[in-house]
Amino acid sequence: MSIVMKPTATKDEIDTVIQKIRSVGLKADVSSGEYQTVIGIVGDEKKIDFDQVRSLGGVFDVIRIQVPYRLISRSYIPEDVVVVVGGIPIGKDNPPVYIAGPCSIESYEQLYRIGKEVKDAGAHILRGGAFKPRTSIHSFQGLGEEGLEHLESVGKDLGMPTVTEIRSEIDVDLVAKHTDIIQIGARNMFNQDLIEAAAKTGKPIFFKRGFSAQIDEYLSFAERIVANGNRNVMLCERGIMPLGGSFKSQTRFTLDLNAVPVLRKETPFPVFADPSHGTGRRDLVIPMSRAAIASGAHGLMVEVHDRPQEALSDGAQAVLPQDLKKIIKISDLVYKTIRDSDAPFSSDLRNG
Ligand code: PEP
Ligand code: MN
């Protein structure tokens, strides 16, 4: 249920509605726009009487939202949300935003070297993992806190905002202290305590789709970020399980580009694509970057390494800095061509 207040509603009238929601043990998500306040309900809506709420003073309309992930649905937030990071507007009809850097932070020098290259290539945001989710305990697990310190220093030295993955709830304050954006990776997409703890920091959350998650499940977990008072949400399609499993397939994952226009239609939040994890192959990153932007992605996350054969993780999918330059150039061209065409991105939202 979403309660739309009249533009003339007083603070007392708004408070009465909020009290009504709280009186049955539910939480209220209040969004005060320029003209109107809209109040969403967090919890089991069946506990509250639709008609009683409608009859309260100052209420303009009460709308039932059918989708399970109502707080992040377009029915609740109709206008595209722009997330601003380090002055960079992300989402809506803004030009694509490029997040690039190594899979793992290996040292200050490595991150600075690659960071400088990706900045020169046109990337906006620096990525690098300090807490790596790895299948094997024998693989490099990341530098942890030391890695976060390198990320913060390199970000400052290059003047780039940063993103890094959080793996455990225990590290929420630590990670939030060192980075501009907190990433929740595919393996933790179902980890509701981690999602809620990260959301409560108020930092932008880069929330990746799990590789076995249906879109409805993905959005229901993403909704938890908004339900915890954080509207700085960035979604990311990063590939789903390929047929035959990742060891028999030509690609590590299958980049599900259907998800991009579906997510844009269902929610107002920025949608990214990650063609690096989505394919697992360096030679496929350029073509799938082009395709992702054409499908409507607001930005890309790309893994880059200048010495991929020496990378401590994901070397096979890391592109060289000169490839990133090509990716950004062609992706910007694709974006502009579609934006200026007879079938611009915004028309996808109206079709069907
Ligand atoms: C990553 O971005 O470093 C990563 C591990 O991604 P994913 O969670 O999509 O596998
Ligand atoms: Mn990686």
Image (cartoon, helix red, strand yellow):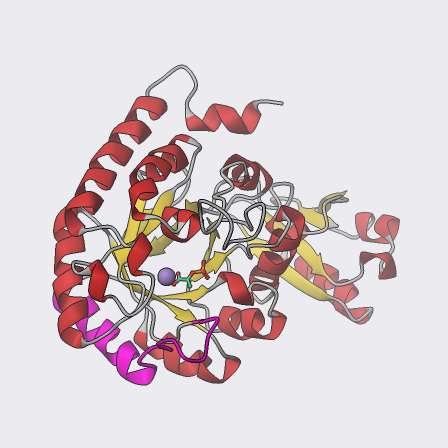
**Is residue 294 at least partly visible in the picture?**
yes
In the image, taking residue 185 as reference, residue 149 lies left or right, namely: left
x, y (%) of residue 102?
A: 26, 62
Q: Is residue 135 part of the magenta span, yes or no?
A: yes
Location of ligand 2 given as a quarter of the image: bottom left
Q: Residue at x 75, y 63 (%)?
A: 43
Quadrant position of residue 39:
bottom right
In the image, taking residue 184 as reference, residue 159 lies left or right, namely: left
In the rendered image, the vertical position of residue 14 relative to residue 23, given as above or below: above
x, y (%) of residue 72?
A: 60, 51
Q: Residue at x 42, y 82 (%)?
A: 173
Farthest top residue? 342
In the rendered image, the vertical position of residue 36 relative to residue 247, given as above or below: above
x, y (%) of residue 162?
A: 29, 64
In the image, taking residue 301 as reference, residue 240 lies left or right, namely: right
x, y (%) of residue 195?
A: 55, 69
Q: Nearer the viewer, residue 21 or 84?
A: 84
Farthest front residue? 248
Q: Residue at x 68, y 50 (%)?
A: 70
Extent of the magenta region: 133-157
In the rendered image, the vertical position of residue 111 relative to residue 9, given as above or below: below
Q: Nearer the viewer, residue 263 or 94?
A: 263
Q: Is residue 304 part of the magenta span, yes or no?
A: no
In the image, taking residue 184 as reference, residue 156 lies left or right, namely: left
Q: In the picture, which quadrant includes the C terminus?
A: top right
Q: Residue at x 52, y 72 (%)?
A: 200
